[in-house]
Image (cartoon, helix red, strand yellow):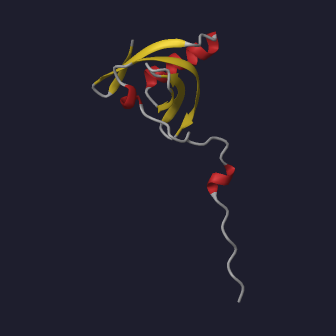
Amino acid sequence: MTAPATPKRLVDYSTLQFPENALRLDDIADQEVTIVSGHTGPGKFGEYAVLEILDVDQNPITIVTSGMLVVEALKNAIVANLFPLAAKFTRTGRAWKIE
């Protein structure tokens, strides 16, 4: 009897991977940060954004969010080539306010 073939893995066909050590906006809420780059992509529940930022101590951090206002603002910043950008994210209920 031969062993069954090992099934292929879905991850082998993914062109996008969740960034290792990525944080959420909650982790930097109410802090002044600098966005140095970013990109958007299609997600399960709509678009998402990956932000490469520097915190107040200039430590690099990757943030992943699907916040609609953040995704839209990032897309506009990418088109206009506006990086680096200062930002502060504040939670207002279930949404995010960008300052």
* Residue shown at 54% from the left, 42% from the top: 20
* Residue shown at 45% from the left, 35% from the top: 23
- Residue nearer the viewer, 58 or 4: 58
Looking at the picture, does residue 94 appear above or below residue 89? below
Q: Which quadrant, please, contains the N terminus?
A: bottom right
* Residue 95 percent location from the top left of the image: 34, 25
Quarter of the rendering containing residue 41: top right
* Outermost left residue: 93
* Residue 7 percent location from the top left of the image: 66, 67
Q: How many marks?
A: 0
Looking at the picture, does residue 85 appear above or below residue 47? above
* Outermost right residue: 2
Quarter of the rendering containing residue 82: top right
* Outermost front residue: 57
Could you tell whether 63 is left or right of 27 in the image? right
* Residue 59 percent location from the top left of the image: 50, 25
